[in-house]
Image (cartoon, rainbow, N blue to C red):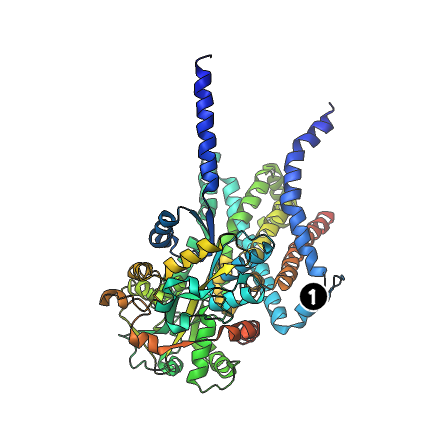
Amino acid sequence: MQKKHVGILLVMPALVFTLACFLLPVLALLLEAFQIDGGAWGLQRFVAFFGDPLNRQVFLRTLRIAVLVTLSAVLLGYPAAQAAAKVAPRYRGLMLGMMILPLMVSPIARTYAWIVLLGRNGAVNSALQALGLSDEPQRLLFSELAVYVGLLQLLLPLMLMSLVGALENLPRDVTHAAATLGANAWQTFCKVTLPLTQEGLIVGGTLVFTGCVTAYVTPALLGGPKVLMLETLLYQKVSVESDFGSANVIAVILVVMTLMVNAGLKRISSSRSKV
Amino acid sequence: MKNTLPYLFAGGLALLAAGSAQAEKRTLVISAYPIAQPLFAKHVYEPFKARCGCDIVVETGNNADRIAKLEAHRASPVIDLVLLSDFGMLEAANKGLVAPLDYAKLKNYGQIYNFAKNPIGGNFAVGYTIYSVGLVYRSDKVSGIKSWQDLWRSDLKGRISLPDVSTTQGPLMLQMADLAWGGKGDDYATGMQKIAAIKNNVVTFSKNSAQLSSLFAQDEIWAAPVARFTWSQLLKTGMPLKWAIPAEGQAAGMNVMGIVSQSKNADLAYQLIDFWLSKEVQTALAMDLVDSPVNQQVVLPKDKAEFNTYGAEQIRSLKFVKPELILKQRSNWIAQWNKAISK
C-alpha cells in the first residue's frame, strides 16, 4: 500500500466522525437561516435582523468587545510570551503551567470570582478608594467593562500559548543579528520577531476573537441583560422564545465574523511578509 | 465440558426468564424541571414505583427545551407525563402535544385549590404547586416597604434588582408594576414604561435565584422581588432580610402537570398525578421546601409555613397572570424590554 493511501485511511475515522457529527448538522442548521417562509431561499432574514436598531447595536457591541479583547490579548501576550520563551527550559514548564492555570478553572467559578472582585465592596473598588481615585464605590459589575475584563482573563491564556509556541521556534540568532546590525528593541520586534511569529498571532487572534463571540457564561453573568451581546441574544431566542429562525441568523453572523477575522489577520500578515 | 453444559443451559433459561420479567415491567417517562430531583425521587418517584411496580425515567430541562422535545417526538411520544409552567403547558396544548384530562380519575382533585383546577382551560392540566413573588428587603437599610411602588423610591436607587422579563418571574413583575402604577391594558404597557424609567436604578435584571442570593450576600442590593421558594436560601446569606406582602398583593406563578397526547402509559400517568396531589406527598414536598402545596388539607408547622406559599394571608394575596396573556405578549414584551433596557 502506498504511503498516501495509508494517510487517507488513518484520517478517515476522524473525518467521518467530524463530518457526520459536526459539519453536516451545523451546515444544515446554518442553511436554515437562508430559507424563508414557503421554502424559498434568500437573505430576507438577515435584512430583517439588521433592520432592527437593537440588533445592530448588539452586533456592534459584540464586535467592539471582541476586537478590544483580542487587541489587549496581543498587547499583554507578546511581552509575557517573550519572557516565557526566554527563560531557562527548567523554569519554562512552570511558567507555562501558570499561564494555562486559569484554563483549568471552570468558567463559572472564574466569573463568580469576578463578581466578588468587581462588586461594591470588592477588591477593585476598595483599591480605587484607598488610592483616592474614587470617593464612593463605582458600578463596575454588569457593565461592558466587566464583560471585557472577564473575557480577557478567560482568553488571554490561548493567546499566550499560541505566541509562546511561535516564539520558541524563532531562531535566537536572528534577533541577535538584528541588534548587531543596529536595530533597537522596537525595530527588532517589528521587523524580525513579529513577521516570524505571525502564524502564532493569527492562531491566537482567531482563538481569542472566536472565544469572545461564542462565550455565553461571561457576558451573561458579568454583563446581564443590560449588556446584551449576540451570544446572549441567541440564547434568549432559542431558550425563551423558541425562535430558531432568528437564532440561526445569529449563528451564521457569528461564524462569518470569525471567518472574516481569521481572513483579515492572514491578509495583514501576508502583506507584512511582502514588505 | 460435559458437566458444565446443563448449568449453562439452566443459566440461559434463568436469564431469559429475567429478561421477560423485565420486559413486562412498564416504564413511565416524566419530563420535569431539573431542580430538586433527588427530593422528588425520595418523596414521589420511589414510593410510586413501589406502588405501581413500574419504573420511572425522568428527563429534565427548561420549558422551551422540553416543549421542543415533545414536538420532535409528536408522532411517537417518548414522554408520558409533563410538568411545565402554566403558560408553557398552554403552549404545549395549543400545539396539540398534551391530551385533555379526565379529572374524575383523580381521587384527590377535590382537595386542591380552585385555581389549581383546570388552570389553563380545556381540561389540559392540573396545578401541582404554586409560588408567590413578594418583596424582600434589608431591614437594617430600608424600612416601610409596603407597596410595589416602593421599588421606585429614591433611597433604593442603585440598590434594587428586578427579574429579567425573559425569566418565568419577569412577566409576574411586569404585572405587579402595571397594577401598582394604575395600568389598564392587557399589554402591561404602563408597567413596562415604569420599569424602563428606572433601569439605571436597577443593579441588574436577574436571571435566577442563585444570582439574587449572591447580590444580597455581597451587599449589592437592598430590595428585590423574590419568589417564595428562594426565601430560605436568601436567609442563609446571614443578612437581616424581611419579606413584605405589598398592598397590591403578590404576583403568583403555578406549575402544572399534563399527559402527553398518545401516551401509552396514560393510566400510570393518572395514578402518578393523583399520588402527587395527595395530602401525604404534598406535605412531604412542602416540609422539605421543594414545592408549596396546592392540596388544601396540608397542614404545615410554623417554621415550614414561613418558607412556603401557604396560609390564608399568602393565598389571599396571590395575583396570577393569565397564561394566555403571557403566551400572546411574551415576544412583544421581550422585544420592548431589550430595546428599553439593553441600550
Residue identifier under label 1: A45
Chain designation of label 1: A
On screen, residue A197 above or below B92:
above
Image quarter of the C terminus of chain B: bottom right
On screen, residue B191 above or below A205:
below
Residue A1 in picture, x, y percent from top left: 73, 22
Residue B325 visible from this viewpoint: yes
On screen, residue A32 above or below A120:
above
Q: Please give the name of the residue rendered at 66% of the width and 38% of the height, measured from the top-left corner.
A: A15
- Quarter residue A39 falls in: bottom right
Q: Nearer the viewer, residue B130 or A252?
A: B130
Q: Residues within 10 Å of mark 1 (few under 14, many from 20)?
A: some
Q: Nearer the viewer, residue B268 or A213?
A: B268
Q: Please give the name of the residue rendered at 46% of the width and 50% of the height, measured from the top-left corner.
A: B28
Q: Nearer the viewer, residue B63 or B180?
A: B63
Residue B157 in picture, x, y percent from top left: 39, 78
Residue A21 in picture, x, y percent from top left: 62, 44
- Quarter residue B296 falls in: bottom left
Q: Please give the name of the residue rendered at 61% of the width and 54% of the height, measured from the top-left corner.
A: B75
- Quarter residue B261 falls in: bottom right
Residue closest to the far top: B2
Q: Please give the name of the residue rendered at 70% of the width and 56% of the height, measured from the top-left corner.
A: A31
Is residue B251 toward the left or the right of residue B88 in the image? left
Residue A188 visible from this viewpoint: no
Dot 1 lies on which element?
Answer: helix
Q: Nearer the viewer, residue B45 or B54?
A: B54
Residue A77 in picture, x, y percent from top left: 53, 50
Is residue B217 toward the left or the right of residue A51 in the image? left
Residue closest to the far left: B302
Q: Amino acid at mark 1?
A: Arg
Is residue B321 toward the left or the right of residue A209 in the image? left
